[in-house]
Image (tube, grey):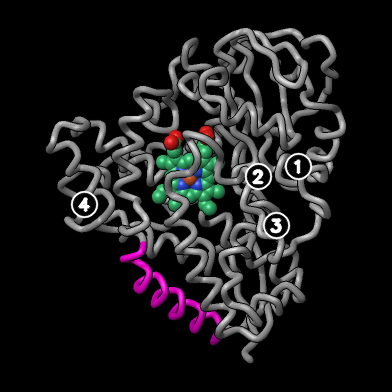
C-alpha cells in the first residue's frame, strides 16, 4: 500500500515520470506540469505515489465518466476506501456508485432544481449589487476575502437554510475536505489540524432543527419523512452541499475577477454584451478549473487508449490539464468568453456531474452581471497569490481596483 491504495507497476507503454503533483509550488503554478503531462501520452506513471495520471481531454473524460470501470465508491482521492477507513463517513452521493448513488442523487437534485434556484435569483442579484457598490466605493480591495469569499458565504448558507453563517468555518471545512483527497503532506496535515474547531460546527448546522423551513436543506429532510432516505442520510446530504458548494464557488469567483482584470478586452466584450456573463463563467471554469484533480479507482482490469490498467489502480484525472488540451480547444491558453466551452470538464461529466452547478452559475452570474453593469474597469493592484490545495485551484490574495464608469 502507498497513501492508502494498492501499489501498481507502470503499465507497458506508459512513461515513468518522477514528479510530485502535490508539491505546493507546482499546485500554485501548475501550467508547466499540465503541458508536460499531456505531452507524455494518455497516461504517465508517477512512482512517488504509484498512480497513473491522465491529463489529455479524451482519456480524462473517458475515465472520469465511466462509473462502471472507474468507481467513486473507493474514494475520489488517493485513498482506496476498500483498503483503508476514510477520515469521515463517506459522502452518500460523491463517494458511492449506483444503485446507492441513484437514490441519493435524486433527492439532492430535487433540492437544487432549476426552479428552486430560480426563486433565489432576485435575492442573489440584490446581494451582488450591494457588494459591488461597496467595493466600487472602496476602489482598491482584496478580491479573495472581500468578494470571492464574502459573496458565497453570504448567499449560499442562506439558500441552504443555515441558521447562521461563519465565513471562516465554511471555507476552512472545504479546505479540509479537498486537501484530504491528497497525500499525507503538509497541506493535508495543516488543513486537518483545523478539524476540532470546524467539524463539530458543520455537523451541528446540518441538523434538521437548525435549518430554516424554506431552504435546500429542508427539501432534503422532507425526503426522510417519506422514507426515501433516512434522517441520518439527509444530514449527510446537507453536509455534501456544505463540503462541495463553498470553496469551489469561492475559487471560480476569484478566478473570474483575475481573468477579467488580466484581459481588459474580454471585460469590454462582457460589458458590451451582458448576456455573455454565463459564458464568462464557463470559460473561467475551463481556463482555471477550480477542481484541478479528482481520482477514480479501476474496479476491473481494463484498457484505455491502448493502455492496460489493472484493478485497484488509482488514476489522477487532472481536469485542469484536460481543460487546456490544445487538441480539443484551439488556442486553449487564451481566455475568450465568446468560446462557449459547453463541454469542459470543470463541473465533472456523467452521473456524478456537479449537482450544484445551477447554484454556482446563478451566484457567479449575479456577481458578473453586477460588475459589468456598474464597474468601468478592473485593474490589478498587486501580485496575485495562489493558495495551494491538493484538489482545488484557488487564489489566496488578489488585490484589484474597480473604477467607476
Ligand atoms: C463552480 C463551482 C463548482 C465546481 C467547479 C464544482 C465541481 C464539481 C465536480 C468536478 C464534480 C464531479 C465530482 C466527481 O465526478 O467525482 C462535482 C460534484 C458535486 N458537486 Fe459541485 N462544483 C461546484 C459547485 C457546487 C455547488 C454550489 C454545490 C452545492 C450546492 C455542489 C455540490 C456538488 C455535489 C453534491 C457533487 C456530487 C454529485 C454526485 O456525485 O452525483 N457543487 N462538483
Nearer the camera: disc 3 or disc 4: 4
Assess whether mark 3 and mark 2 are in contact (beta carbons under 8 angstroms): no
State the residue position of label 3: 385
Q: Distance between the residues labelled 2 and 3?
A: 10 Å
State the residue position of label 2: 388
**Quadrant in which the N terminus is drawn:** top right
The label shown at residue 25 is: 1
- Neighbours of disc 3 within 10 Å: few (<14), some (14-19), many (20+): some
| Residue shown at the point (47%, 51%) measured from the top left | 357
Task: Tell me the SS state at disc 3.
Answer: strand
Magenta stretch encompasses residue 365: no
By secondary structure, the bulk of the magenta-drawn segment is best described as helix
Q: Quadrant of residue 22?
A: top right
x and y percentages locating residue 45 in the rendered image: 77, 19
Q: Give the range drawn in magenta.
A: 118-137
Q: How far apart are marks 1 and 4 (CA)?
A: 40 Å
Q: How far apart are marks 1 and 2 (CA)?
A: 8 Å
Q: How far apart are marks 4 and 2 (CA)?
A: 33 Å
Asked if residue 295 shows in the view, the reply is yes
Task: Tell me the SS state at disc 4.
Answer: loop
Drawn side of residue 331 relative to residue 106, left or right = right
Assess whether mark 3 and mark 1 are in contact (beta carbons under 8 angstroms): no
Q: Which residue lies furthest to the left in this view?
A: 225
Amino acid at each position: 500500500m502507498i497513501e492508502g491504495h494498492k501499489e501498481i507497476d507502470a503499465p507497458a507503454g506508459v512513461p515513468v515520470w518522477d514528479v510530485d503533483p502535490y508539491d505546493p509550488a507546482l499546485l500554485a503554478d501548475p501550467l508547466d506540469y499540465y503541458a508536460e503531462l499531456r505531452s507524455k501520452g494518455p497516461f504517465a506513471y508517477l512512482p512517488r505515489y504509484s498512480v497513473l495520471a491522465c491529463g489529455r481531454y479524451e482519456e480524462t473524460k473517458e475515465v472520469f465518466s465511466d462509473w462502471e470501470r472507474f468507481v467513486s465508491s473507493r474514494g475520489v482521492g488517493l485513498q482506496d476506501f476498500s483498503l483503508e477507513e476514510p477520515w469521515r463517513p463517506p459522502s452518500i452521493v460523491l463517494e458511492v456508485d449506483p444503485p446507492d448513488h441513484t437514490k441519493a442523487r435524486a433527492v439532492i437534485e430535487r433540492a437544487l432544481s432549476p426552479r428552486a434556484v430560480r426563486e433565489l435569483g432576485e435575492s442573489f442579484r440584490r446581494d451582488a449589487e450591494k457588494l459591488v457598490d461597496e467595493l466600487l466605493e472602496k476602489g482598491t480591495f482584496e478580491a479573495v476575502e472581500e468578494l470571492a469569499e464574502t459573496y458565497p458565504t453570504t448567499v449560499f448558507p442562506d439558500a441552504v437554510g443555515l441558521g447562521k453563517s461563519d465565513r471562516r468555518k465554511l471555507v476552512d471545512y472545504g479546505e479540509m475536505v479537498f486537501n484530504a483527497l491528497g497525500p499525507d503532506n503538509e497541506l493535508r496535515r495543516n488543513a486537518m489540524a483545523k478539524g476540532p474547531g470546524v467539524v463539530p460546527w458543520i455537523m451541528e448546522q446540518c441538523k434538521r432543527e437548525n435549518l430554516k423551513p424554506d431552504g435546500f436543506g429542508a427539501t432534503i429532510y422532507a425526503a426522510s419523512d417519506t422514507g426515501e432516505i433516512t434522517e441520518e442520510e439527509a444530514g449527510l446530504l446537507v453536509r455534501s452541499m456544505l463540503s462541495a458548494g463553498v470553496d469551489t464557488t469561492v475559487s471560480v469567483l476569484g478566478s473570474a475577477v483575475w481573468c477579467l482584470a488580466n484581459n481588459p478586452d474580454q471585460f469590454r466584450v462582457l460589458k458590451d454584451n451582458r448576456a455573455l456573463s454565463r459564458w464568462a463563467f464557463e470559460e473561467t471554469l475551463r481556463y482555471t478549473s477550480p477542481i484541478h484533480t479528482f481520482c477514480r479507482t479501476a474496479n476491473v482490469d481494463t484498457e484505455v487508449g491502448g493502455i492496460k490498467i489493472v484493478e485497484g489502480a488509482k488514476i489522477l484525472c487532472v481536469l485542469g490539464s484536460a481543460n487546456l488540451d490544445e487538441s480539443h480547444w484551439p488556442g486553449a491558453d487564451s481566455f475568450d468568453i465568446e468560446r462557449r466551452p459547453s463541454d469542459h470538464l470543470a463541473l465533472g461529466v456523467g452521473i456524478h456531474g456537479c449537482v450544484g452547478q445551477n447554484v454556482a452559475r446563478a451566484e457567479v452570474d449575479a456577481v458578473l452581471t453586477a460588475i459589468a453593469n456598474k464597474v468601468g474597469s478592473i485593474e490589478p493592484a498587486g501580485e496575485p497569490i495562489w493558495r495551494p490545495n491538493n484538489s482545488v485551484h484557488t487564489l489566496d490574495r488578489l488585490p484589484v481596483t474597480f473604477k467607476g464608469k
